[in-house]
Image: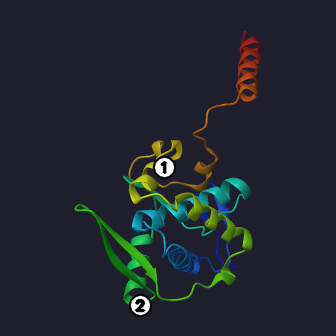
Amino acid sequence: MPRPRHLGTITVRLPGEMSRLRHMILYVARRCYSAKYFGAIKLNKIIWKADFDAFAARGVPVTGREYRRQKLGPVLREMKRLHTEMLIEGAIRVERREFGEDIVEFRTVAQDEPNLSLFTTEDLSFVDEAISHYWEMTGQESSDGSHGVAWRTRANGDPMPYELSLLSDRGLGAAQEKRLTDMIARRRTQTL
């Protein structure tokens, strides 16, 4: 059993923990090869969305890796180092694609097959949903979409624990708002 990882206040144990991210990069790169846009930003955002959506829904992320807040959104702490290692090993390659005069994309292309035995069907469904969510988006649109309340509560370089996935950018519904208002009123009368 892998050593527990401490992500915020939640301890997560995931099988094959050290290679989960590597194989997730390969999986996402293979699935997104035919996408019109798929650069480094979008790769990060897909994995982030899958991890945080999975944690919000079931209390367990897909990769279990740590995230940091950066200018363009949440980023896997070890992504740059791991991506470079995978390039050197030949597990991936990077294609340069130009869109117009001033937009250049560096697309990760998987050279190796991902080991999907590390993931459950449910894990992969969160990843596939994230891929579908970002499919038509550019890197900039993907980045902008990751700047929700969880990102705004942090400074660049700060950890982004999985518990942040429980925060919502949606307003309260009428029933939630009434419940909160009633709770505040009760507490006020208790303190008088």
Q: Quadrant of residue 80?
A: bottom left
Q: Which residue is mark 1?
A: 145
| Within-10-Å neighbours for mark 2: few <14, some 14–19, many 20+ | few
Above or below: residue 41 compared with residue 17: above
Secondary element under disc 1, as helix, strand or loop, is: helix
In this view, the residue farthest toward the left is 101
Which label was assigned to residue 89?
2
As shown in the figure, which amino acid type bears the numbered disc 2? Answer: Glu
Where residue 82 appears, as percent x and y from the top left, is 44, 77
Closer to the camera, 8 or 122?
122
Q: Residue at x 58, y 84 (%)?
A: 114
Looking at the rendered image, the quarter that the N terminus falls into is: bottom right
Q: CA distance from mark 2 to mark 1?
A: 32 Å
Q: Residue at x 40, y 68 (%)?
A: 39
In percent of width and height, residue 182 lies at 76, 19
Q: Give the percent coordinates (x, y) of residue 18.
A: 57, 79
